[in-house]
Image: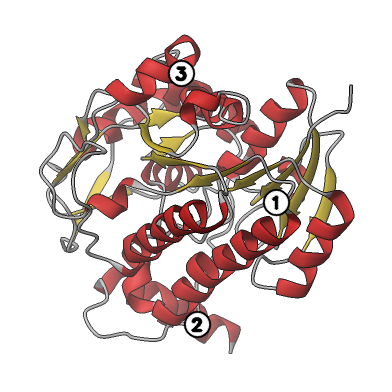
Amino acid sequence: MKKPISLVTGCSGFIGSHVAQELIKMGHTVIGLDDLSGGFVENNPGNMIFYNGSITDATLVNGLFEQYQFDYVFHLAAYAAEGLSHFIRRYNYNDNLIGSINLINAAVNARTVKNFIFTSSIAVYGSNEPPLREAMTPKPEDPYGIAKFAVEMDLHCAHRMWGLNYTIFRPHNVYGENQNIGDPYRNVIGIFMNQILQNKPMTIFGDGSQTRAFSYISDVAPIIASAAVRTEAYNKIFNVGADVPYSVNTLATVVAQAMGVKPDIQYLEARKEALHAFSDHENVKAVFGDLIKNVPLEEGVSRMAAWAKGFGARPGQIFEDIEVYMNMPPSWKRLIVSQTKKAA
């Protein structure tokens, strides 16, 4: 029997590398595509065929589809800095929307793709009151969420027009090994660990009372990978992640304990963000319940901390091509200005 061939975009990133590994375990031939803007070659799983390139390169994307005749597409490539997306609007839409459309066009034209699996985000819900449910009307409030919702709508259109099957996942606050802890704009657990490894205080926007449900990677990646073969998940949307929300203050205490230090917190100016954001997961439990492990926060953070301490601190990756500075969090602006001066 022919092995299924799957494309994984963002294969060198955090969730993408884990999904690629799960697909290899499932017996897929995996072709990985990543521009390494936020991922690392060392994250690439063995036995994966890797291409260093961008989804915004339509010629490259079309060539891969023609060469490999993919059975499944797992689209995880994105610059997922939700808060920063206000200030890098052009970059956000080009990378997260136009790049996605290149993939959808290629999948339609290839006529071989059985299912297009897309990782969206709970950012599409915007100001909706938690717990966030798939039946809610999305109200994205930042360019990142807008781009993700636009891709969701385009997949609906592609299914109606050409019969392209899709599965959409809306993960949230995922953490674990392979995460880019050097990115100062996203992934609060990684940011905390990187700050501790550099003997710096953990920085929190606002008073730390905002709540999120933090999701360990093993509760997310196997579910996304299995969407290839679970036809009951075709043409549906699923929230995926942890059920129990925690305050960022509580999270800081858990991370400090896992890293073997006392909590040292520096509170910064509050950002414009939802105070509480967590999801309902009844739909994903109904289809993928056998894959959900429900890893407790303390256990997941402990596993990631062991990896982070073994790996070491990462230098901060500063996004320098800012398009709008107005109303940017002062700490980010200071960081960018400081880095620019050092480079000069």
Type of amino acid at the residue the image marks with label 2: Asp
Q: Could you give the CA–CA distance between mark 3 and mark 2, rounded to whole angstroms?
A: 40 Å
On screen, 85 above or below 289?
A: below
Q: Nearest the camera: 160 or 108?
A: 160
Type of amino acid at the residue the image marks with label 1: Phe
Of badges 1 and 3, nearer the viewer stands 3
Q: Quadrant of the C terminus?
A: bottom right
On screen, 37 above or below 98?
A: above
**Image spot of residue 260 (x, y percent):** 43, 25
Disc 1 and disc 2 in contact, CB within 8 angstroms = no
**Image spot of residue 296 (x, y percent):** 36, 16
Which residue is denoted by mark 1 in the rendering?
A: 40
Tell me the crowding category of disc 2: few under 14, some 14 to 19, or many 20 or more residues within 10 angstroms, Cα based: few
Which residue is denoted by mark 3 in the rendering?
A: 288
Type of amino acid at the residue the image marks with label 3: Phe
Residue at 45 percent of width and 57 percent of height: 80
On screen, 223 above or below 53?
A: above
Q: Is residue 261 visible?
A: no
Q: Is residue 307 visible?
A: yes
On screen, 224 above or below 268?
A: above
Kindly state the secondary structure of the residue where label 3 is placed.
Answer: helix
Q: Could you give the CA–CA distance between mark 1 and mark 2, rounded to whole angstroms?
A: 21 Å
Q: Nearest the camera: 82 or 301?
A: 82
Tell me the crowding category of disc 3: few under 14, some 14 to 19, or many 20 or more residues within 10 angstroms, Cα based: some
Disc 3 and disc 2 in contact, CB within 8 angstroms = no
Q: Residue furthest top?
A: 290
Mark 1 or mark 3: which comes first in sequence?
A: 1
Which residue is denoted by mark 2 in the rendering?
A: 321
